[in-house]
Image: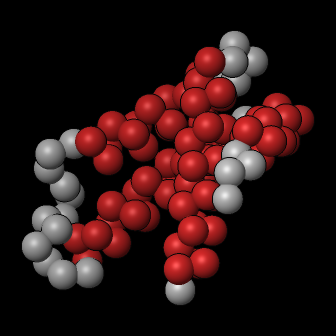
Amino acid sequence: MMMRLRHIGRYVKQAVKIYRLALKNARIPLRAKLFLTLALGYLLLPFDLIPDFLLGIGQVDDLLIVLSLLMSAMRLIPKDIFDQYRRQATEIDVTP
């Protein structure tokens, strides 16, 4: 279980690095940058579409909205740039 959590943590850390690099690149479409910004903004908002006190449902809507925004942004980023950023994020993250 701990190995799985570490793997997920490493993946999220790499994804954050990729998206941070993408936001700085002028070749990335504005719509992709907007989706990335909206995903971050939604995570930071103090209110939700479905309140979190509704066990399960409240967290699932947050996850679905953020994941759909991130996946949409990822589809808009040119593949060669995305692959380059993925390599950079992997090379940087060599800590055990």
| Vertical arrangement, residue 34 with respect to residue 1, above or below | above
The answer to whether residue 42 of the structure is visible from this angle is yes
Considering every residue shown, the one lying at the far top of the view is 26
Q: Nearer the viewer, residue 86 or 73?
A: 86
Residue drawn at x 64%, y 47% as measured from the top left: 14
Q: Is residue 3 left or right of residue 55?
A: right
At a point 43% along the width and 53% down the height, the residue shown is 66
Marker count (numbered): 0
Residue 92 placement: quadrant = top right
Q: Position of residue 13 (x, y in %)?
A: 57, 49
User: Which image quadrant for residue 49?
Assistant: bottom left
Residue at the farthest front position: 96
Outermost residue, bottom direction? 1
Which residue: 10% across, 73% down?
53
Q: Is residue 26 above or below residue 84?
A: above
Q: Could you tell me which residue is drawn at 14 percent across and 77 percent down?
A: 54
Q: Is residue 77 left or right of residue 41?
A: right
Residue 12 image position (x, y, % from top left) = 56, 54
The answer to which of 46 and 85 lies nearer the viewer is 85
- Where is residue 86? Give x, y as percent: 77, 43
Asked if residue 86 can be seen in this view, the reply is: no
